[in-house]
Amino acid sequence: MKLITRESPGLRGINDPQVLQTIRDTLRNRKEQLLRAAYLAIARDDARGTNYLAEQVMEDRRQIAGCGEERGSRPQRSKKSLIFSQPFASATVPLTLKV
């Protein structure tokens, strides 16, 4: 390594090329971090999970109950929520699942 210049300590002027480059780099890094965080937040908010095992159990349950629906066909669903009736100790308890 070879020492090219030695600068005196203290404040640098805004027109100093090294100061301008440091400011540009800092702004670019902060913008990149902000955009990355926003992208990840949107990706997490829009993520949807599907419980295929629960769908299969409900489908088999409908077939056993004799609802007449064929395997693979799906009932019309509301985009807001699904309401099923689940027998519980000789009473029917509504079960609401948010979609």
Image (cartoon, grey):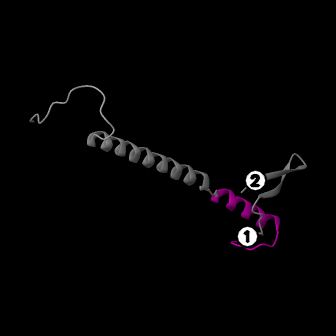
Residue at (31% x, 41% y) in the render: 15
Question: Is the N terminus in the top left, top right, bottom left or bottom right quadrant?
Answer: top left
Residue 79 placed where, x, y %?
75, 62
Residue 43 placed where, x, y %?
55, 54
Please state the extent of the stretch shown in magenta in the rendering: 52-73
| The magenta stretch spans residue 48 | no
Residue at (43% x, 44% y) in the render: 30
28, above or below 77, in the image = above
Q: Is mark 2 on a helix, strand or loop?
A: strand
Residue at (75% x, 53% y) in the render: 97
Q: Which one is in front, 55 or 37? A: 37
- Residue 72 is drawn in which quadrant? bottom right
Residue that mark 1 sits on: 74
Q: Is mark 1 on a helix, strand or loop?
A: loop
- Residue 59 is drawn in which quadrant? bottom right
The amino acid on which the numbered mark 1 sits, given as a three-letter code, is: Arg
The amino acid on which the numbered mark 2 sits, given as a three-letter code, is: Leu
Q: Which one is in front, 52 or 43? A: 43
Tally of marks: 2
Look at the numbered discs 2 and 1 and tell me whether their residues touch, using CB distance below 8 Å.
no
Q: Earlier in the sequence, mark 2 or mark 1?
A: 1
Residue 76 placed where, x, y %?
78, 69
70, above or below 16, in the image = below
99, above or below 68, in the image = above
Extreme residue toward the left, this view: 2
Extreme residue toward the right, this view: 91
| 34 left or right of 59 in image | left
Disc number for residue 97: 2
